[in-house]
Image (cartoon, grey):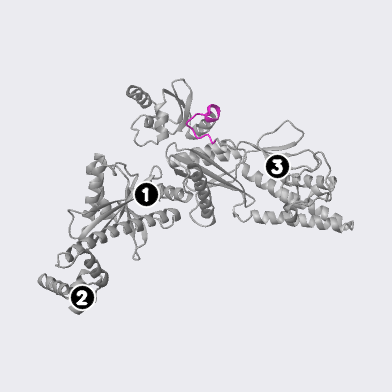
Amino acid sequence: MEERMERLRRESMALPLLPGVYLMHDKAGKVIYVGKAKALKNRVSQYFGSQTNHSAKVRQMVAHVETFETIVVGSEFEALVLECSLIKQYAPKYNILLKDDKGYHYIRVSPPPFSRIAVVMQKKDDDARYIGPYMSSYGIKQAVDEANKVFGLSTCQRPLAFGRRPSAMERPCLNHHLGQCCAPCTGRVTEAEYAERVAGAIEWLTRGSAAMIATLEERMLKAAEDLEFEKAAKLRDRIAAIRRIDSRQKVVMSRVSEQDVAAMVRSNGKACFEVLRFRGGALRDREEFVTDEMDEEDADRGEFLRRYYAERDEIPRQITVDRLPTDAQLLEEWLSQKAGRRVHIVCPQRGEQVQLVTMCRDNASEHLARVLGVSGRDTAALDELATLLGLAQPPARIECYDISHTAGEDAVGGMIVYEHGRPLKSAYRRFAVRTAKGGDDAAAMMEVLARRMTDLKEGVEGFEIAPDLILLDGGEMQVRAVKEVLLQLGVDVPLFGLVKDSHHRTRAVSAQGGELSVQSLRAAYTLVSSMQEEVHRYAIGYHRKKRGKKIGTTLLKIPGVGETRAKALLRHFGSVGAVASATREQLMTVKGMTAPVAEAIKMFFSDNV
């Protein structure tokens, strides 16, 4: 193993500092990964150095590399074009290939009379008519459903012309009463009338709403001129139905007439890419792809866009993304050349486009959550937090710490754990601060983290799992102090602080060198705010419990005061100080109190002032 890695590293260091494409081969000589590089030596040698900064998928790929070959080209743009071509040719295992389980879809029109229109995944050798194929199911399923409703076509399982003729004596189903079916099963329409409806639906599906409305309006006017007012009224109603469908589709609108909105979220070693396709300003289609995380976030995003548009001829004028990929300019140049016109890749900062990107990310989060069996909201929050903090991947396990004390006395530390965005209460831990004195929160935090990380290194039960992220309730001073402790112990875990505003609400995330605003990131803000509130509740709860035990111990020193009477005194007066200040008459009002015990209480506190 070491011999192989050393050989590969030696060969990669001999590569030129020129742009090109590299192909990784396994023992059988099969191409398992294709990549491009601005400088081949720098890029390829990274794979065979330290593996600590690589994702799990990259480490797995490197473990199977036996040899590699390179192709030097004239520019990075030529490398991009060649990379796309080679990936299409070899379909390497470790590249993003955008394979999904949906396949191609067709519109199936069953044979007449009384044809049905439906979406299917395979063409059969029958007498039906097939229209397609379509790459995405979202838009075509929606369109067929709407066409059936607008033109009143049958979608139920009632027999129409299969072995018998419709009967006028039959009662129509609910779809007819909802105005979504012309009830051919009851003989309410003739075969010719129904065939006309089917032809109209097919024309709408193949030509679009605008062309269909123009045709229907022309036929409506002709019918009116011919004094066929009933026919003209039916055509008018059909035009109105199509316009209602169009207006409902335009609930999600974009001022940019033609664009794709793309976003990526990551969780648990997986990445989900979502694309919302806007045409004519309205949302017309959506696609999502789940794949393993490969490399860096921006590199994954760039590779996804290359894979996605390499397989498509229709490229919009604008591609709106949640974050610009590392090779955005090269991608623009390649897409513009492929489309034969200028294509722009933009990352919006405000306004309507930001809302569309947020919607795209939310959809990607929900889809990835269904795949992983977790909450979409938690997935989105962790992904936003990772992006904000510059983490290589979303943190699966987060530990958050807080210190609680009263004027420096009875200081304690609380540790809470969130796993996959949710509290893991079985992993919560508390610490009694032993060495830090006088309300020094930074020293107390250093002590708590030193003890926790020492237990981690020693494998102490309950502390043997390392966090992916540490958050402290405090600012830069606490972060710097604890960072020194982690460095001394050789623990390499991302560390940040949570800063509150004057209203004790989370204001920002503190790092060494400044603060990062989190309030504009809805999901991430909700997550860190809930963690800060939860760790404060947990720490202060332990502090009060510890302080209460100490106070109770003081009362138990008084002759005649047992646990029951001590609790009654604290419940009545609220604190030991109030008990000490009470008169004999006030003490006698406590349930179960006697004159001798009241006298003993007064004497005890007068002797201990």
Q: Which residues are magenta?
A: 86-98
Quarter placement of the C terminus? bottom left
**Other residues around mark 1 within 10 Å, as few (<14) / some (14–19) / many (≥20):** some
Q: Find residue 105 and report its image quarter.
A: top right
- Across and down, in percent, residue 568 comes to 25, 69
Q: Nearer the viewer, residue 551 or 25?
A: 551
Q: Gap in Å between the C-alphas at discs 2 and 1?
A: 45 Å
- Residue positioned 85% across, 47% down in the render: 190
Which residue has dot 1 on it?
Answer: 424
Residue 40 visible from this viewpoint: no
Q: Residue furthest left?
A: 607
- Across and down, in percent, residue 230 comes to 85, 57
Which residue has dot 2 on it?
Answer: 587
Q: Nearer the viewer, residue 518 or 550?
A: 550
Residue 370 falls left or right of residue 498: right
* Mark in the foreground, 2 or 1: 2
Q: Nearer the viewer, residue 36 or 183?
A: 183
- Across and down, in percent, residue 212 comes to 75, 50
Q: Amino acid at mark 2?
A: Leu
Which residue has dot 3 on it?
Answer: 118
Q: Amino acid at mark 3?
A: Ala
